[in-house]
Amino acid sequence: MPMTGVLRPGHVALRVTDLEAAVKHYGQVLGLIETGRDAQGRVYFKAWDEHDHHSVVLRAAEAPGMDYMGFRVDSEATLDRLAAEVEGSRLASDLQWVPAGEHLHTGRRFRFTVPTGHAIELFATKDKVGNGLPDVNPDPWPDGLVGMQPTRFDHCLLYGDDVDGVVKLFTEVLGFTIAEQVMAGDVMVGVFLTCSTKPHDIAFIRNPEKGRFHHCSFILDTWNDVLRAADLISKHDVSLDIGPTRHGITRGATIYFFDPSGNRNEVFSGGYIYYPDKPTINWTVEDLGRAIFYHDRKLNEAFLNVHT
């Protein structure tokens, strides 16, 4: 399929209550690479196989959570077009242009609040810093990797009230499609949206509170890497949520854990390739345990109810 319009998740900006502990967690345990610090005190990271300057931004705050999630689009012209279409849709609020340079090595960004209360932004320009390998005759991975060694920032799962409005915005304006959904009769409880060939690039769960952050996720190569991540979680006394296990939704092998501030992280592997002509997979709330945790088929109350 032609990759045009919105290309992929580009970054997530997180609030942390202990910046030093968070830097250690994301750098040494998760295994992201620090790429810079700015005058505001924010710390920038990337996964090793990402070429963009950064995909995670941390800032010190009194409470944890997500400030915003950004998606990369294919050109400055597309950025202008989508900004105009978002504005014209009347499905978003708090529209603003963030000037080039506000993020290190990043062009202008268009930010808006979606119906679930989350800040989302689009950008077209971010400097390429490479993945530590040459573009000619590269090895499979660079030397010096540490921690869980994810290859990329993959997606976020967000909680909010107006899932119907957010689906309308993402599908009709931004060009996403629904890969999977969870239904309670005619009510959409959860939705997994993709702009690529992945099972999801962003997901939403219906919740009475607006603007809640459930987790950000990073991709690993294999199930054995997920098991190794579990070893590292225990070795470094990281707070474990659940796993290793498998999702029914997306089919990914997964483990969930918390950063020192209480923001949930996921690393996972597997899943399927998605194409636009693939039928939407439907799950019912009666089988939600198997949909979320396929092996033990039981819901984890902390997984459902703990969010920042």
Image (cartoon, helix red, strand yellow):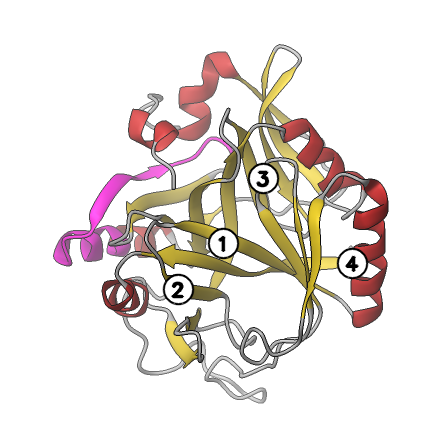
* Distance (Cα) linking label 2 and label 4: 29 Å
* Distance (Cα) linking label 1 and label 2: 9 Å
Q: Is residue 147 above or below residue 82?
A: below
> In the rendered structure, are the residues bearing label 1 and label 2 in contact, judged by CB atoms less than 8 Å apart?
yes
> On the image, numbered disc 3 is attached to which residue?
117
Tell me the kind of residue under disc 2. Arg
Q: Position of residue 302 (x, y in %)?
A: 30, 30
> On the image, numbered disc 1 is attached to which residue?
67
Badge 2 element: strand
> On the image, numbered disc 4 is attached to which residue?
5
Tell me the kind of residue under disc 1. Asp
Q: Is residue 244 magenta?
A: yes
Instruction: Classify the position of the N terminus by image quarter.
Output: bottom right
Q: Earlier in the sequence, mark 3 or mark 4?
A: 4
Q: Residue at x 50, y 24 (%)?
A: 208
> In the rendered structure, are the residues bearing label 1 and label 3 in contact, judged by CB atoms less than 8 Å apart?
no
Badge 1 element: strand
* Disc nearest the viewer among 4 and 1: 1
Tell me the kind of residue under disc 4. Gly
Q: Position of residue 88 (x, y in %)?
A: 86, 46
Instruction: Classify the position of the C terminus by image quarter.
Output: top left
Q: Earlier in the sequence, mark 1 or mark 3?
A: 1
> Within 10 angstroms of label 1, few (less than 14), some, or many (20 or more) residues?
some
